[in-house]
Amino acid sequence: MKEDSQARTVPVLVPTPVDRPFSYAVPEGMSVAPGSIVRVPIGPREVAAVVWDGEGETVDARKLRPISAVFDCPPLADTSRRFVDWVANYTMTSPGMVARMFLRAPAALDPERPQEGLRFAGGEPERMTSARKRVLELAGDGMAWTRSGLAHAAGVSLTVIDGLAAQGIFEQVLLPPRPVVAKPEPDFAAPELTDDQASAAKELRRRVAEGSFSVTLIDGVTGSGKTETYFEAIAEAVSRGKQVLILMPEIALTQAFLERFQDRFGAPPAEWHSDVSPRMRERVWRQVAEGSVQVVAGARSALFLPFSDLGLIVVDEEHDAAYKQEDRVFYNARDMAVVRGNLGGFPVMLASATPSVETRVNADSGRYRSVALPARFAEAALPELEAVDLRRSPPARGGFLSPVLIAALGETVARGEQSLLFLNRRGYAPLTLCRVCGHRFQCPDCSSWLVEHRFRGQLLCHHCGHHEPRPEACPECGTFDHLVACGPGIERIAEEVVGHFPEARTIVLSSDIVGGVRRLRLEFEAIAKGEADIVIGTQLVAKGHNFPGITLVGVIDADIGLSNGDPRAAERTFQLLSQVTGRAGRTGRRSRGLIQTYQPDHPVMRALVSGDAESFYEREIAERERASMPPFGRLAAIVVSAATRTEAESHARALRRAAPRSDFISILGPAEAPLALLAGRHRYRLLLHGARQSNPQQFLRALLEAAPKPRGSVRVQVDIDPQSFL
Ligand code: ADP
Ligand code: ZN
């Protein structure tokens, strides 16, 4: 901030890809402070931006432009601004683009309009009816009501209210904006906890009471009561008047969670995710900023809500890859939640039945605390798991279900119980080819096969969304009726299931279901009510849903994720399959999990079947340590993309040549990306592999500084701690 004879100037961070705040003049009579949300001109436009601290980009005094207006909105808290700087610095994104994530609800910057209301003004109506009497009994004490609220409470129609108003019995008043959710009550319905849960809850409550930064892993098998237990921590924070954020990987689908929260606290949390209407998002944003919303359950972007007094973040299913955003700002919301807790000085809790190796190592080393819930709640027993060796018990020709699995399905259906078949592949078949000429259907814009979606009659690219109708004849050789589907998707499994069990009620569930989230919610409800016998689904059904009737889980292809060159392949497969098989046995009935695999001796399969997660983690951690893979080493990726392969390749090579010398960091590549063509752009990758104590950001800054600037269609994307290697 500068005070001089001419004009006071302040640094303002605008939501565009700029590295530093710009200077703006503060007009006479305007008062701003760091954090104030203001409207400023930039080029020909005006944008919402945030007054920052430190130095702004100095602008020639003649070009210095004034701030247009200050929004009537709480300023962005100091810790939120530190958070923007931190995230920008760590992810190597411009602070402007990170600040932009805080300014996603433009209309929320202006105060919500008050609601119109009525208040008893005295007097008597000309004629008293029983309906009018009921209204006056309620309103007679002078409390303000909304028109519809009063009608509803008195059990009368709106015309009764309007009739009284017309006689001057009521005066018009303005009521504060309606809260998006009621206040949660910490003691609304406190559960009776088991001994294990109670001691975990006590520990978690203590963390909240300390009111300082800490990270605690809540480690317990599915159904052990992790949610129940962290609700206690939330109750503690709420009763201390703090705000709470619960991050979830698939928030749009967690209706059951919201209901549970409401049962526990008497009110639901505010929701924040892409399926919430823009109007609702604006109200949530505003009320979070004002502090009137106390608990938010949200997807990763909720981390960038303008909390005024955040006191706890819970990251549920902390291992989930959905926490990584790979768009504009590449960040891992779980890691950034820990950062936010550190900057804000409050506890962060990470819950998972299958913690990430990173979190596990942090807990083992004592950097994170941990609480354990070793057993499932009540009589719910974990399912008995068994590997089905597909070499010994192969499916019939053209099928994907082994006789063992078919028999188990038959028994389960006969008992009137539910089964879940899991395959992480949408559509009918992952590849279509012509039996005559061998032509394979490929996306014109990506290096990937088109996936047949038979329900829709289309071939679809799962990377860019390209779709085309499935032709009758081969586009290459023109032969009719010789296209064959290769490999299974869930639609094809459904076909096979219906062939075996034509009487069974079958539901197919994946994210591309017609009807979207609403339809999914209905289907989930139907399943929970027992209205389906066999559910066939992708990972969507694996995540956190509680279907009490499921007693058989069949994994169609357990090997799918193991051979994709991802350093986390084993970990991911273990997590996913644990979660899927954990869908079974939520009630006292005996339940089974059958895992179809060609590699029954693979450590992942062994760990799953034996239920020995410990030895899996031990092995995986030792392996990572030996290879100095995260968290024992650091990774960062650079993806170069361009309109032509040559441009992408030559720029990637230039980056490599510009790399500084380092004893701690080595560079792999450039190599053509596995997904060499994506949405029409050619891609090359470089991978930085550093020792634990290395500083990849510093290295990358030096590299990018020394390298030629990308020209033409060339784009360079840095991905710190990459999760995807495609
Ligand atoms: P997790 O989060 O570990 O999967 P949950 O908290 O969802 O476990 O608990 C699993 C199921 O057991 C839920 O239906 C939950 O309501 C029930 N449950 C767990 N603990 C208790 C408890 N102490 N009292 C009543 N129900 C409980
Ligand atoms: Zn494509």
Image (tube, grey):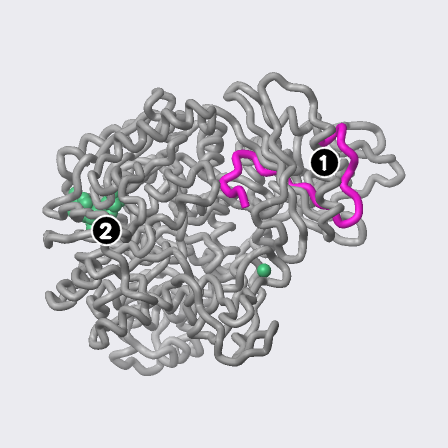
Q: Nearer the viewer, mark 2 or mark 1?
A: 2
- What is the chief secondary structure element of the magenta stretch? loop
Is residue 174 placed above or below 468 in the rendered structure?
Answer: above
Is residue 207 placed above or below 273 in the rendered structure?
Answer: above
Answer whether residue 48 is magenta in the image.
Answer: no
Q: Mark 2: which amino acid?
A: Val
- Res 485 → quadrant: bottom left
Answer whether residue 724 is magenta in the image.
Answer: yes
Frontmost residue, 303 versus 206: 303
Is residue 70 placed above or below 313 in the rendered structure?
Answer: below
Looking at this view, name the residue that lies furthest to the top.
663
Horizontal placement of 168 versus 33: left or right?
Answer: left
- Res 26 → quadrant: top right
Q: Is mark 2 within 8 Å of ligand 1?
A: no
Q: Mark 1: which amino acid?
A: Arg
Residue 90: percent from left, percent from top:
58, 31
Q: Earlier in the sequence, mark 2 or mark 1?
A: 2
Q: Which residues are magenta?
A: 704-726
